[in-house]
Structures are given as structure tokens and as C-alpha cells.
Image: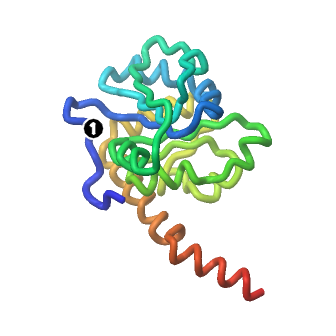
Amino acid sequence: LRGQVPRDGTEDGRLILGWVGSHSTTFNLYRIWESLERIFARHPNLHLRLLGAGHDASALPLFERVSYSTTPSYTPEEMIREVLRMDIGIFPLFAVENSAVRGILKALVYMSGEAAVVCSPIGTLTELIRDGENGLLAASDDEWVEKLDRLITDLPLRRRLAAAGLETVRAHYSLRRSFECLRTALEI
């Protein structure tokens, strides 16, 4: 979507970690709550933007050090604007069957907005994300902290992963590519 030089933080110097979801998926933030607290303690220039978190603030972790803002819902246009402001997109999941069948759409949204992405290595995300090439995979709390820390402190890495993520989307998930796959499937 952006196709330009990846963002280097907001105008006020903050880096934006972003999460896109809904009120029914905010529970996944609990998977990395402690990791977020640790990473925000190290980096006061971070801000967590929660898109689609719903109106019930009690569904969110009781963040102590995490600077965050929410929007309860969003339109497709608002989602695009928000994702284009994100430096890093996060996709935490619990290692349960429900997560394994979730799909890759959220990661593709971040990647298409040229945000570097960090995902749990669950389900087909392990096929989409080539760790260290077009995004990062983090399974444990320590890995979430380590991988987020690397993206926060290593601007060339963040830029490289963001660009590779966008290229992955353009090469394999365009509308044209989707129709080609559908046509092939229907010819069988």
C-alpha cells in the first residue's frame, strides 16, 4: 500500500506497535502481556495502537508500563490508514487448535502496509513468515521480547523485513494471483 520508505516512528519520535482485531480476539493480547511490559520498560518511545479492541476496556490486559490507545471499531478505510502508521504489526496467538485455523490475513494486512511483522508460529503463519526474511516468528515470552527489541533497535532490519513483507504480498497475494489460483483449481 505504501510502497515508499518505511516509517521511522511518528512525528513525535514514537514507534508504533500495532494490533488489528476485534473485541472477540483481544484475549490474544494476554499471550504477550508480560513481554510487552518488559519491552516497554526498555523503550519509552513505544506506543501500542489497538485497532478494533471494542468498548469494554476490562477485556484488555491491565497494562502498567505499556503506553497504548484504542479504537473500538474501524472501517476498511480506517484500517488502511491505521496500518500505514504502524512500524511493527503484532499477531500473538495461543498454541491451541482455534489459533491454528485462524489463517494469515492479519499478517498480510500488516505486510501490505509495510509494517514489519512479528507473529506466533501457529498454523499457516509458519508457511507465510520466513523468520528473519519477511517477518519474525516468536513462540516464547523471551522470543517476543528479543524479536521486538531487535526490530525496535535495528532500523535497517525493520526496513528490510517491511520491504520483504510487502514484496511477499505483491508476489503471492495480489488479486490477480488469487484469481490465477482459483482458475487453476476450477480447471481440475
Amino acid type at circle 1 is Gly
Q: How many dots with numbers?
A: 1
Q: Nearer the viewer, residue 61 or 154?
A: 61
In the visual, does 44 lie left or right of 147?
left
Which scheme is used to colour this image of the protein? rainbow
- Which residue position is annotated with label 1? 9
* Quadrant the N terminus occupies: bottom left
Snapshot quadrant of residue 130: bottom right
Residue 1 sits above or below residue 117 on the image: below
Tell me residue 148's x, y (percent).
45, 35
Residue shown at 40%/50% (left/top)? Answer: 77
Snapshot quadrant of residue 182: bottom right
In the visual, does 13 lie left or right of 173?
left
Residue shown at 50%/70% (left/top)? Answer: 174
Q: Nearer the viewer, residue 144 or 4?
A: 4
Residue 139 sits above or below residue 83 on the image: above
What residue occupies the far left of the structure in this picture? 11
Tell me residue 86's x, y (percent).
37, 41
- Determine whether the residue tagged by mark 1 lies in a helix, strand or loop: loop
Residue 147 shows in the view: no
Tell me residue 156's x, y (percent).
31, 48
Tell me residue 9's x, y (percent).
27, 37
Residue shown at 58%/53% (left/top)? Answer: 105
Residue 18 shows in the view: yes
* Quadrant the C terminus occupies: bottom right
Residue 11 sits above or below residue 114 on the image: above
Around disc 1, counting alpha carbons within 10 Å, would you say few (fewer than 14), some (14 to 19), or many (20 or more)? some
Residue 166 sits above or below residue 188 on the image: above
